[in-house]
Amino acid sequence: MPRIYMDANATTPVLPEVVEAMLPFWNERFGNASAVHGFGRGARGGIEAARDQVAKLIGAKANEITFTSGGTESDNLALFGVLKPGDHLIVSEMEHEAVLQAAEYLASRGVAVSHVGCDGNGVVHAEAVKALMRAETKLVSVMLANNETGAIQPIRAIADVAHAGNALLHTDAVQACGKIPIDVAELGCDLLSISAHKMYAPQGVGALWARKGVEIAPMLHGGAHERRKRAGTENVPGIVGMGKAAELAKVWMADGGSDALANVRDTFERTLCERVERITVNCVGTSRVSNTSSLRIEGVSAEELVISLDMMGLAISGGSACQSGAVEASHVLRAMGLTDAEARSSVRFSLTRHTTVDDVMEAAGIVADAVKLLRSVRQQL
């Protein structure tokens, strides 16, 4: 049975060009990048080239990039590296658990934490952030694009509010990087998190950008790696792969890839809404990243639909893959004002760059059949 993959926000396939770039660093240029001999210098060269590629993707300087093990570590490093007991942190209610749970832990260690809400389209407004600012506010953390809905946040306006109160602005750009153009100067942020496996590079690699002059206390100790911000021997092949993926993403966006994918996404939503009654597109009233569609389908549970679609050859998610198996309704959708029942009937379709119109047309038919069957079963109970 042919399968259709529409869960790119959970992870993306590694591009062939990325694999090709990585191969030499497993067998030919395998040295420890901290070693001074030729093998080490070869590995170091790969890392520094990747650092430059990642920096160019977001309009940054190479020496402002710190490589990590992924988006979660980058988010944690941004928060733990900046905040200390007595400081005040503002986070949005829609953040990834990597931020929310880090904030919860910081609260247990003497950091005051406030949560800012959003509107019905999943957008955090700068005025709401301003209302929570205090003299002790040291950091504001609001993601650039939501992992469940794709909603893009007004980071520039929020950064201006943070800076007016002498606070820093961190944005989790894991679901935005490689999908929309990013320029850290235009965003006005001070810290920005990226994950490689959301942009067609391997899992287990990420990066944190920190504006020059922003001091970050390391979480890991044991060496001078990554300019003493992140101890531990670097994952050279993974970092090289991330760099190549960043280079390819920049070209893809410049060639209109994002707009083309948005058209495919819109075709999918339009077709599905024509074939299935009582369906709502979450956050349709705001700007979204081009690959993401959060749909609320009345009369079915997200859990049942995800399982049914998997059996029919279509891979999607009930929300964040990091919450797989969770029984609670999505905190993102509840923050938008949806009821628990509405949140539990919402599913996420996230397209890859390679998803075609034929793919989404076939997927729409599969979803329509699955919904019809599930609604029929429920009516008989």
Image: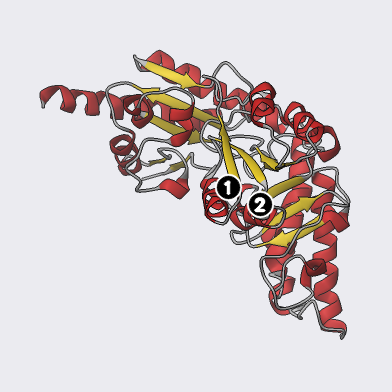
Question: Please, what secondary structure does the residue beneath circle 2 have?
Answer: helix
Residue position marked by numbered label 2 in the rendering: 79
- Residue 221 location (% of width, % of height): 69, 74
Three-letter code, disc 1 = Val
Report if the CB atoms under discs 2 and 1 are less than 8 Å apart.
Answer: yes
Residue labelled with disc 1: 99
Residues packed near mark 2 inside 10 Å, few (<14), some (14 to 19) or many (20 plus): many
Count the marks: how many?
2
Q: Earlier in the sequence, mark 2 or mark 1?
A: 2
The part of the image, by quadrant, that contains residue 311 is top left
Left or right of 255: which side holds 219?
left
Say if 285 sits above or below 328 in the image: above
Q: Is residue 31 left or right of residue 359?
A: right
> Where does the C terminus fall, quadrant-wise?
top left
The answer, for residue 349, to whether it is visible in the render is yes
Q: Position of residue 133 (x, y in %)?
A: 69, 32
Q: Up-down: is 33 above or below 172?
A: below
| Of 106 and 377, the residue lying toward us | 106
Please tell me whether mark 1 sits on a helix, a strand or a loop.
helix
Q: Position of residue 371 (x, y in %)?
A: 29, 26
Residue at x 70%, y 68% (from the top left corner): 237
Display coloring = secondary structure
